[in-house]
Amino acid sequence: MLDSILFYFFAGVAVLSAALMVTRRNIMHSAVFLVTTLLAIAGIFLQLRAEFLFITQIIVYVGGIMVLFIFVIMLVRLDVALHRVRFRLQKFVASLVVLALALELVVILALADKLPASLFMKESVAANHLPPNSEALAGSLFSSYLLPFEIASVLLLVAMVGAVVMAKSRRRSEES
Amino acid sequence: MSDTSFQNATRSNETLLGADELVLNMGPQHPSTHGVLRVKLKLDGERVRGAECVIGYLHRGVEKIAENRSYQQFAPYVDRMDYVAAVSNGLGYCEAVEKLLQVEAPPRAKVIRTILTELQRITSHLVWLGTHALDIGALTPLFYCFREREEILKIFEKYCGARLTTHAFRIGGLQYEAYDGFEQDVARFCQDFERRIQDYVDLLTGNSIWIGRTRNVGILSAADCIALGATGPVLRASGVKWDLRKAQPYAAYDRYQFEIPTGTNGDTYDRYMVRMEEMRQSRLICLQAIESIPEGAIFGKVGKVIKPPVGEIYHSIEAPKGILGYYIVSDGTTQPYRVRIRPPSFVNLQALDKMVRGHLVADVVAIIGTLDIVLGEVDR
Amino acid sequence: MTVLLQFLETWWVQLVCGVVIVAVVPLIAGYVVLVERKLMADMQARLGPMRVGPHGLLQPIADALKLLIKEDIIPRDADALIFWLAPVLSMTAALTSMGAIYFGPSFRVAEDINIGILFIIGVSSLGFLGIILGGWASNSHYSIIGAVRSTAQLVSYETAGGLAIISALLLSGTLRVSAIVDAQASNHMWFIFMAPVGFFTYLVASIAETNRAPFDLPEAESELVAGYMTEYSGFRWALYFLGEYANMIVVASIATTLFLGGWLRPFPNVHWLNWIDLLPPLVIAAVGAYCVYRAGKQPVKVQVWFMWAVALSCFAIAVLYVLPWLVQPLRFALPGLNGAFWFLLKISGYIYIFMWLRFTLPRYRFDQLMHLGWYILIPLAIVNVFAVGVALLLEAEFGWNRWIAMIVTTACTLAVSIYLVRLQDKRSAAASSATAVTSDSYAG
């Protein structure tokens, strides 16, 4: 019972925040509502017993990516950028995407009784009885998925170095 | 006070070449400009391209007032210029008028004047050290410096009744005899002071953060100093060994042995070291002086009415902040025709533009602090 | 209705602890401010707050009341929602992250989360959003720049701090808070002795994390660019301020748990030192006795009563500590009480180091700060993680004694750090000699 209440709370917050996010005129408000959406989703992860994913969502997504978004919003002159973007088909593409998602939802709900119940909701368990999430993740990451892990880290390194190089060369070209 | 927006909005100035320059205003009300000084910084991103000082917020018309006061009446006004080092202002003025009158203060007066002036030099440098360290972020030296300064101010209060604007000297000598226990008080202070200077050295001199904030910051070469007219510790830190106490001795300075500290680079760290060493040397002068204060009169042959002969005189002394000069023109009446004061801070401040070029905005505060300016003197 | 009762029945302890945290921590943070002011005064040869209450003990209450009744000023073009949200977010992040801290073997809000340390770090990093939103919402160019600088500083030092934590986590093998402390108990040694470089790195990183001196340029008074807190006054500012001090407590708790043995007493497993367990009540009773001694010297009657009240509460707490020794059925509370005492003592020691450094050291300039973080601290932390890993590997694969392996690798890490610092000195000396310019004063 409590689980349902918590789930509906998190889900409600997520849906409401997402709706507010896309309808706000002020872009900073949208960013803040995106933050609340992500936090609510993190709560749902926790309910699904994926505590590592929960904290990674908070650290990486909210604490890293959203901070980056907010930096960009603050430091980029948006009125100039907005005038340049003239994508006329935006409404059409958005309706297509919504249609696809709705179709997906309908299919899932129709086939709901054919899917195992444990896929949708798990009973809550005391936090210290959860299956050790981080250890299992680490174990598979460093044994079976070692190569993709290393490739991903090299990719991140390349992206970081590239960003530094691009920023430096722009500053040098500004100075000259 | 510290969280009010003390900067105005910035404007973009188009220079002749069409490049954009940002002007940042460090307004008259600022915790770190040591008074009401307005500095307009021309910025290029983070780097400072130049600084323009707007002064005059503390102008009180002191030189004009002098034209309507008698020579003795003007003496207290002189204290209020460099209010941190009032005694040396008084020394310069009294000696200038004595030179005009062609009288000399008796030896006892000269020695006591020297002791009090050297104590005042220590106080001025202590105030400088405390506030400069505070600007750079060290919170504690300020309180230690003011604790030492308190002892000296007590000596001044016992001597002449005032702590800050002392009016300690009179034209022709001294009014007050050194009180009983004067030598003991000064000796006790000098004995304690050596240990206290070590406290400041421990806190700051070897500290890598302090060195990082002050080394190579605000470099002023010797040629620049001489061209700009900078004097005092600013000049000596750039390597020029010029101190009026040795070059043109006044009061009783020719009697005592002391060193003139100089620096090599002319950066903020060197100015810090020079002033620290000057405090030590002042202490030595005081110790030597109280050994042998000559007996005798304390007031020379000066009548009640001072009417100097027609003429003009320029007399300068080594004030804690630099060379303080008085140019007095007399027209034979009891009131001077013109008193022009050459304040060290006013001339030193002109070097600010040269010193801040190429530095970051955060260094400007350190550079203003290292010049050791007092706005009372800059604006008069 | 039954759902509510069911909920309360299972979760009442956590609810009470949560309420205690939200209600009590701001008060404690206020008293930490008072302690800081008194310590600062002591190191500066003066007395600090003395008037409000005996020895200034009621000063935080007076300050809180003053801030509460101040006029609420919002800049004209500021975004009201975000202006309101930012300090709330900052404070909430700090308080929520306290939920997973074990103040003793049994004092906590959240159950023993499997990702304990990661939770604390992750949720406290939500405070960055509070800073950056606060700077933006003030609608002042300089607040934004101050906020951006502050966030850049926080992010850089968070990396270094995280790497330092990893070195301790390697030693404990788990993220779970209670298991980390148990690992230190079973190793018979706090992790600070096994990974001292990690502790030092975390110390520096946590000072920068909480915007304390010498890394407090973004919020310094005498700098040109005003910080993100400029436009906040009254209680909003108090929220930021308390968030900063709550963050200090969180960071001290992390360091204590990971490096200083958490709630373990010194020498936890040495039996002949068991009498150390008697120290907590004695120390508290001694504090109470000192209060009684000072009570006689207070000038005003009200202050005398107040000191007596403080003394009596100290004695009450001491009695609470002694009771389980005397009353057998209450023995179960003993580890909890002792653990809480040692934990709070260690947090206080860590925060004392913060304050000591604030009063002693000048401030780093921003570029020097970033230089220190990226050029010195992060490489040092990376090398440290590598070194600790190598030490563990040596112990596991080659059968080395853990101590010898640790000492060897720590020596290597220190050698690398000395090399890094020397390299930086050489580079900065070269840079400064290159900028020595002769200029013609008469030109232009």
Image (cartoon, coloured by chain):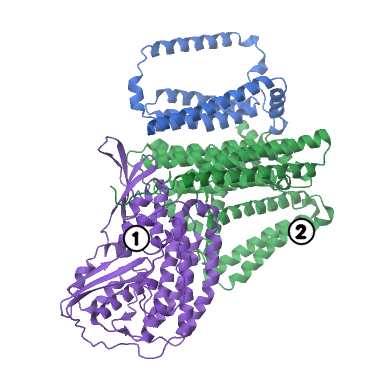
Chain colours: A blue, B purple, C green
Q: Amino acid at mark 1?
A: Ala
Picture quarter containing residue C98?
Answer: top right
SS for callout 2: helix
In the rendered image, the vertical position of residue A13 relative to residue B235, given as above or below: above
Q: Which mark is residue B230?
A: 1
| In the rendered image, residues at marks 1 and 2 fall on the same chain | no
Residue C437: x and y in percent read 41, 47
SS for callout 1: loop
The chain identifier of the residue carrying mark 2 reads: C
Q: Amino acid at mark 2?
A: Leu
Residue C245: x and y in percent read 54, 49
Picture quarter containing residue A120?
Answer: top right
In the rendered image, the vertical position of residue C101 relative to residue B61, given as above or below: above
Marks 1 and 2 sit apart, C-alpha to C-alpha, by 67 Å
Of badges 1 and 2, the one in the foreground is: 1
Q: Nearer the viewer, residue C389 or C262?
A: C389
Residue C17 visible in image: yes
In the rendered image, the vertical position of residue B316 relative to residue A12, given as above or below: below
Q: Is residue B330 left or right of residue C37?
A: left
Residue A5 visible in image: no
Residue at 76% x, 47% y is: C189
The chain identifier of the residue carrying mark 1 reads: B
Residue C156: x and y in percent read 54, 38
Residue B229: x and y in percent read 32, 60
- Residue picked out by circle 2: C278
